[in-house]
């Protein structure tokens, strides 16, 4: 082994040891920094009939979407039409029989490019009994149709009665500025944003960041690290930084989670949104989260360095930071 290679490996080990030491000092297990009781949750259901979907549909819709309200394309279009008319967004036109009617001039239904979810169900049909042609028997036939979640539409979420509304979450000026800048970035990139359900996630297929409602978080300082985490995931799309996401639980998935949390930590420091009294608790929570994924990676020193590099590139992409080739070598 050359002296250069030995020096490189020594540097990697020293950096990995520093990370490991910091991780060992993170005593708290990772906790969700939001209160799920303040999120709109429940069984996935059809918003028109109010009936919950049954069987495997609950699992599939819960896995593929953060929504709990679903409907067909036509159902959302009709709900959107009624909402537009209620808001006064319509023109009076004549029907073919000469009668006037209200035609909505704003569309609130399913938006272009949204992804449908498949719902399966059984319907019973009558067939002749082969053993007794004189009798009929009923057999189940599998059928399916496509539904969309509320977040695929432009329909606003109905407001809760005043007595049920949670207290608004307080954002400092710095946290609000960071929040607004991140939303400007999402809009520029064409990344969809929604606030539904009790899960924070990035959907690669939909290119969507979803967050629990802000009122579920005790403060803007608790909200922003989670928001940064999901936005860092969004940089991994093939049309941005092009990272491999892997499947839930495998090494690539664990690596991406490490990148996202390191990216969130870097963005927190960049925007200086953690006040001194919250710094220790906030960083401990991030350290505990990172540690849980490092166990999956078996604390591979090189992977820690690689994850840090990719996290830095993700932040640079979000902030549109430009470097010349010489500066890139120091990464």
Image (cartoon, rainbow, N blue to C red):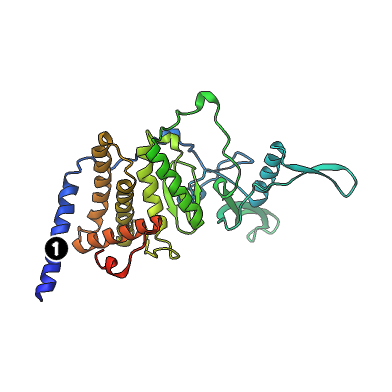
Answer whether residue 60 is visible to the viewer in this image.
Answer: no
Q: Residue at x 45, y 58 (%)?
A: 204
- Residue 326 vs residue 98, the one in the foreground: 326
Q: Residue at x 67, y 48 (%)?
A: 107
Answer whether residue 262 is visible to the viewer in this image.
Answer: yes
Determine whether the residue tagged by mark 1 lies in a helix, strand or loop: helix
Query: Which residue is the extreme one toward the right?
Result: 98
State left or right for residue 65 relative to residue 132. Answer: left
- Residue 63 vs residue 277, the one in the foreground: 277
Query: Which residue is the extreme one toward the bottom?
Result: 2
- The C terminus appears in which quarter of the rendering? bottom left
* Total count of labels: 1
Within the image, what quadrant is residue 161 found in?
Answer: top right
Query: Which residue is the extreme one toward the top?
Result: 163
Q: Position of residue 57 (x, y in %)?
A: 52, 50
Within the image, what quadrant is residue 132 found in?
Answer: bottom right
Q: Position of residue 318 (x, y in %)?
A: 40, 56
Question: Is 22 drawn above or below residue 308 in the view shown?
Answer: above
Q: Position of residue 272 (x, y in %)?
A: 31, 43
Q: Residue at x 43, y 65 (%)?
A: 238
State left or right for residue 238 relative to residue 158. Answer: left
- Residue 128 vs residue 64, the one in the foreground: 64
- Residue 61 vs residue 3, the one in the foreground: 3
- The N terminus appears in which quarter of the rendering? bottom left
Q: Residue at x 57, y 50 (%)?
A: 152
Question: Is 24 drawn above or below residue 248 in the view shown?
Answer: above
State left or right for residue 168 relative to residue 307. Answer: right
Q: Give the class, few, some or many, for how many residues have Cα within 10 Å of label 1's Cα (few <14, many ≥20).
A: few
Within the image, what quadrant is residue 29 found in?
Answer: top left
Tag 1 residue: 11
Q: Position of residue 13 (x, y in %)?
A: 14, 61
């Amino acid at each position: 082994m050359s002296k250069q290679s030995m020096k490189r490996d020594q540097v990697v080990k020293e950096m990995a040891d520093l990370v490991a030491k910091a991780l060992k000092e993170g005593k708290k297990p990772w906790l969700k920094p939001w209160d799920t009781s303040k999120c709109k949750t429940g069984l996935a259901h059809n918003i028109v009939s109010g009936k919950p979907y049954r069987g495997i549909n609950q699992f599939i819709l819960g896995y593929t979407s953060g929504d709990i309200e679903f409907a067909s394309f036509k159902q959302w279009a009709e709900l959107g039409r009624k909402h537009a008319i209620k808001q006064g967004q319509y023109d009076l036109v004549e029907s073919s029989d000469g009668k006037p009617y209200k035609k909505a001039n704003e569309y609130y239904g399913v938006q272009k490019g949204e992804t449908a979810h498949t719902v399966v169900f059984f319907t019973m049909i009558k067939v002749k009994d082969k053993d007794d042609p004189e009798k009929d028997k009923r057999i189940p036939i599998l059928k399916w149709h496509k539904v969309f979640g509320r977040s695929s539409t432009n329909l606003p979420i109905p407001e809760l009665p005043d007595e049920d509304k949670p207290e608004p979450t307080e954002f400092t000026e710095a946290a609000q500025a960071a929040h607004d800048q991140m939303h400007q970035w999402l809009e520029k990139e064409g990344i969809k944003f929604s606030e539904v359900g009790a899960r924070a996630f990035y959907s690669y297929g939909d290119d969507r960041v979803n967050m629990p409602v802000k009122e579920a978080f005790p403060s803007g300082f608790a909200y922003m690290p989670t928001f940064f985490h999901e936005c860092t995931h969004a940089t991994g799309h093939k049309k941005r930084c092009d990272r491999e996401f892997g499947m839930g639980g495998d090494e690539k998935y664990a690596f991406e989670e490490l990148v996202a949390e390191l990216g969130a930590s870097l963005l927190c420091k960049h925007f200086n949104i953690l006040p001194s009294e919250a710094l220790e608790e906030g960083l401990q929570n991030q350290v505990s989260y990172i540690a849980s994924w490092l166990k999956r990676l078996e604390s591979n020193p090189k992977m820690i360095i690689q994850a840090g590099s990719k996290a830095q590139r993700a932040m640079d992409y979000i902030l549109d930071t430009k470097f010349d080739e010489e500066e890139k070598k120091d990464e």
